[in-house]
Structure formats: C-alpha cells, structure tokens
Amino acid sequence: MSKVAPIDQRKSDHIKINLEQDVRSALTSGLENYRFVHQALPELDLEAVDTSLTLFGKKLAAPILISSMTGGTPEAGEINRRLAAAAQTVGAAMGVGSQRAALEHPEQAATFAVARQAAPDLLLFANLGAVQLNYGYGPDECRRAVDMIAADALILHLNPLQEAVQAGGDTNFAGLAKKIEAICKALETPVIVKEVGWGISEETAKRLAECGVAAIDVAGAGGTSWSQVEMYRAPDEFTRQLAASFVGWGIPTAESLLHVRRAAPGLTLFASGGLKDGLDIAKCLALGATLGGMAGPFLKAAAVSAEKAVESLELTRRQIQVAMFAAGAARLPDLPGRLVQVGK
Ligand SMILES: Cc1cc2nc3c(=O)[nH]c(=O)nc-3n(C[C@H](O)[C@H](O)[C@H](O)COP(=O)(O)O)c2cc1C
C-alpha cells in the first residue's frame, strides 16, 4: 500500500476536523449589527426580483460563491464534483482548494479537474497559497493550476496566521507583495487574493490594489477559524496552546468589507467568513460586495449528498431574492444604501 503523503493527510484532516469539531472563531462576522430597512410596500413582483449578474465574462444566476476548500484525495474529489455540479445547476460560482498537492503529485489533478468536468459553464477559481511564491513557485506553477481545471481566474490565498500556528508551516511572508504583483502582470487570467478567515485590513487592501489584483475576497473573522483547525491537528501541547490562543483573532467580515472598500473603492470585492445564509450575503452586497461566499455550510451539505448541496444553494438563492424583495431592491445594484447599523 502506498504511504499517504503528508499534504494528503493534511487535506483529509481538514475536512474531518471541519465536519466533526467546533472550529468557530470566538468573534462574529459583525453582520448581525446591520438590518435591512423593511419595505411593506416594495412595489415589486417577487418573481421578477433579479439576483443575476455577470462576472469575469460568465453569467451567474445568483451572487453566491462556494469558497475554496478542497481536492487532493478521492473523498475531496467527490466533494468537488458534488459542489461543482450543484453550483452549475443553481448558477453560483466556486473555488477549488489549494492545488499545491496536485502540482507536486500530478496523479491528484483529477480530484480538482472533476469540478470543471462536472460543470462546463461554471465560474470556477483555481487556488494556491500566495506564500508558495516565496518557496519556488512562479508564473508557471500558477498557470498550471489554472490550466488543470480550466479556471476563469486564480485565487491566491493569504494565511500567515495559519502557517504560523502549525508545526512546520511556511512562514516566510517577506517581500510577497512584489511577487503577487509579478503574477498579476504575467498571468492571462485575473488574479484574486483572499484571506482564509482573518480578514483584509485597509493597508493590505491598498497594497493588493497596487499589485494589480482583479478582486479581493475579505474572508474575514466570524466563521471557520483556521487556528482552531490547527489546534485540533497539533502534534504537541506547545503547538496546541499556541494555536488555541488565537481563537478571537482577526477582522470581522463586516468591518473588513468597510476597510477594503475605503482602501480600494473601485475594486471588485467578495465577502466571506462566517456568512450563515442568503440574508448575510445580501447584507454583504449592500456593503459593497459583488459575491458572498460560504465554505463550512456548503461543505456540510455536500458531505451528505449532491442533492443536499443543490438544496442548500437553492435555499441561499431564494433567501437573497426574498431579502431583496422585502428591502425593495429589484436588482443587485439596488441593494447598497438599504441597511441600517443597529449594533456597536
Ligand atoms: C475544509 C476547508 C478547507 C479549506 N481550504 C482552503 C484552501 O485550500 N484554500 C483557501 O483559499 N481557503 C480554504 N479554506 C478557507 C475558506 O475558503 C474560507 O475562506 C474560510 O473557511 C472562511 O469561510 P467560512 O467561515 O464560510 O467557513 C478552507 C475552508 C474549509 C472549511
């Protein structure tokens, strides 16, 4: 029997821990501090409320993103297949998980490529850790990740804290902005940068806008906490305690959206991190985002069945549509300006 490579083991650990343990941040997304102004006379026909948009040349029925999660093992491949098929059925967008394992072990490429095979029209995002640009990766590896799944854009994820609280993490983040800039220049496809659950600050957003990124996904605090995931994987007590101490770290998603909008007003913005449903997505759109993403909630649905994944996306789309209806927004661009701040 072949020995499981550590990177595969990490992928299965991630799925297992996310499904079985409480890995929530001690913070909330901050979206609970906003409420739509209810319109008792919306002067709209619910069925005519339009949740569609066009992004990177692809038409979406709803502004929903299945956030980057997985690939690399047969189980992860099946989750990618279910999620991609569901996203195509409902008209949502999707990201696959980090493709580094498949670049290093090409036999794993099929567990990512399955997403494109299941969903030829899907707006699909490739994914690599930006820090790998400091560990030998460059435009070639980025292009290979894009080509592997015929992606419409490449997501580079920033996860300094996750790398810092795990044993043997890749922690050299020095001089990375210049390398991200070089990738933005070299690649034919748009480059998106995201966090993984601790948010993007105003300074970081400014720097990324200068690098020439096509979009930023704030992936703020309030949902899945990767220091908690690493705490459950920790090989010793020292690492466990180190990871556990960051449970309350990060910029809540609502706050991060405001930071990024201030720093880069014209830049396409995605919102994720602790979003619970379509109402939260609608709130993020009202705060300036173009798409709202969820990871944990869609993973749980896809782990049950392909049908559950479709159901979960359909419900999310309907929640957005009904929220728009009751807030008096006929189209997505009508959402901004319809929220009031009720908390802090
Ligand atoms: C099982 C799992 C695996 C993930 N793997 C990746 C990854 O490979 N690349 C990435 O950019 N983000 C990854 N993420 C982070 C998510 O894309 C997202 O930013 C984060 O989980 C916050 O969203 P949530 O609160 O809706 O879960 C992963 C999340 C989960 C739950």
Image: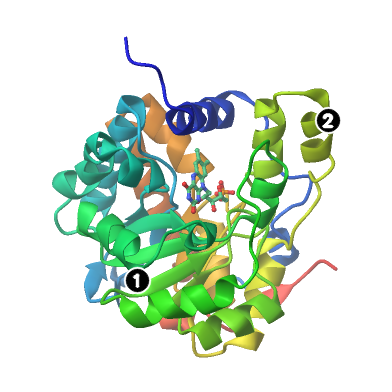
Q: Which amino acid does label 2 sit on?
A: Phe
Q: In the rendered image of this protein, does residue 212 appear above or below residue 339?
A: below
Instruction: Please give the label number shown on residue 238.
Output: 2
CA gap between label 1 and label 2 equals 53 Å
When asked about the image quadrant of residue 118, the answer is: top left
- Using a 10 Å C-alpha cutoff, classify the residue at mark 1 as few (fewer than 14 neighbours), some (14 to 19) or many (20 or more): some
Query: Does 131 appear above or below 288?
Result: above
Residue where numbered disc 1 is placed: 49
Quarter residue 200 falls in: bottom right
Q: Can residue 328 be seen in this view?
A: no
The answer to whether one can see residue 315 in this image is: yes
Q: What element carries label 1?
A: loop
Please tell me in which quadrant of the rendered image residue 233 appears.
Answer: top right
| Identity, as a three-letter code, of the amino acid under mark 1 | Val
In percent of width and height, residue 12 lies at: 46, 27
Mark 2 crowd level (few <14, some 14–19, many ≥20, 10 Å Cα): few
Rendered location of residue 278, percent (x, y): 49, 56
Judge by depth and name the residue closer to the eye, 342 or 243.
243
Q: Residue at x 42, y 48 (%)?
A: 98
